Amino acid sequence: MKKILVMGACGQIGSELVVELRKRYGRDNVIASDIRTEVPQGIEDGPYEILNILDSDKIAEVIKQNEIDTVYNLVAVLSAVGEANPKLSWDINIGGLVNLLELARELKFALFTPSSIGAFGPETPPDNTPQDTIQRPTTIYGVTKVSGELLCDYYFNRFGVDTRGVRYPGIISNVTLPGGGTTDYAVDIFYKAIENGKFTCNIPAGTFMDMMYMPDAIKAAIDIMEADPTKLKHRNCFNVASMSFDPEILAAEIKKHIPNFEIDYDIDEVRAKIANSWPNKMDDSAAREEWGWTPEYDLSSMTKDMLEVLSKKLQK
Ligand code: SER
């Protein structure tokens, strides 16, 4: 049985990953951790540690005490916040990762670290973006993500650390809000559609990005860590995709359920520029071939589920 530590457990992905990991591996075998002192609802039923990714000694103590064999590292400063504070982005995203890689080398645990569509840049082929291609991102977030991919591969090749990861699209979810990202509009739009029937979008019409519904994001994280290592030709990180749309297409899908829904635009230039430098749609055939990646949700099933779940939640 695995013994797992989730770092960044109060964030958008972490808060839902902990719940699923506890279902699969047992409540007491999954330790949630974050810098937050208050444990959020939903993960308060199991073990929780206050951990700062920059505090190696405390992390080592928790890992040793609990005989952890797998760490999910979900700590990250996202793209738009990163542009406002590049040094913080580097310190947390890379400083934190290096701490974990060094600990993984010493204490011998497997490490999941996600990369992102942000690891690509304007020179990357935007359509059917290949697994192995040009990666010259123009955001500090992207710079940390490419560096992270390289560092994780380096620790695997040089020291045999079991590092694995996926390049996440924008993640759409109905539990914890994302914070400071470029793809956040694709979550906000659902809240505003239900609350006001109207949404002002900060990303221009015609800007396509890969997106994914949370259950698939969680499945990707668990499946890659369960994959047979002899089948993996790549490790850090695999393109994973399930849907690609621009704000107009998403709005049209929402209109099928809320006919009076309206979208208008007030563009955030920083986010628009970032979004424009990212792929329209990634090719995820390497993930499909090497570890059997298959998403369950498409635009239509995701939209239906988001509206159903959020309508109930917002009525309370
Ligand atoms: N969702 C992230 C962001 O927008 C991309 O990985 O920054």
Image (cartoon, rainbow, N blue to C red):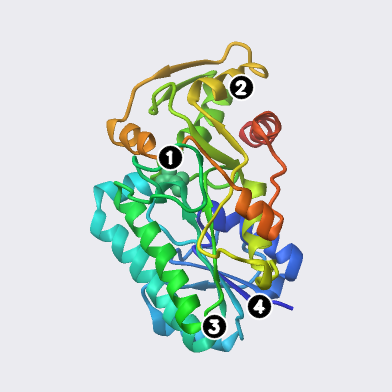
Disc 1 designates what residue? 125
Element under label 4?
loop
Amino acid type indicated by mark 4: Lys
| Residue drawn at the location 52% of the way across and 79% of the way down | 161
Relative horizontal placement of residue 246, taking residue 272 as reference (left or right): right
**Of marks 2 and 4, which one's residue comes earlier in the chain?**
4
State the residue lying farthest toward the top. Answer: 260
* Residue 254 image label: 2
Amino acid type indicated by mark 2: Ile
Position of the N terminus, as image quadrant, is bottom right
In this view, 101 is above or below 84: below
Mark 3 Cα within 10 Å, few/some/many (few <14, many 20+)? Answer: many
* Residue 63 image label: 3
* Residue 27 image label: none
Position of the C terminus, as image quadrant, is top right
Element under label 1?
loop
Quarter of the image for residue 173 reads top right
Amino acid type indicated by mark 3: Ile
Dots 2, 4 in contact, CB < 8 A: no
Real-space Cα separation, disc 1 to disc 2, in angstroms: 29 Å
Disc 4 designates what residue? 3
Quarter of the image for residue 279 reads top left
Find residue 198 and report its horizontal and vertical position in percent. Answer: 50, 18
- Given this view, does label 1 or label 2 mark the residue nearer the observer? 1
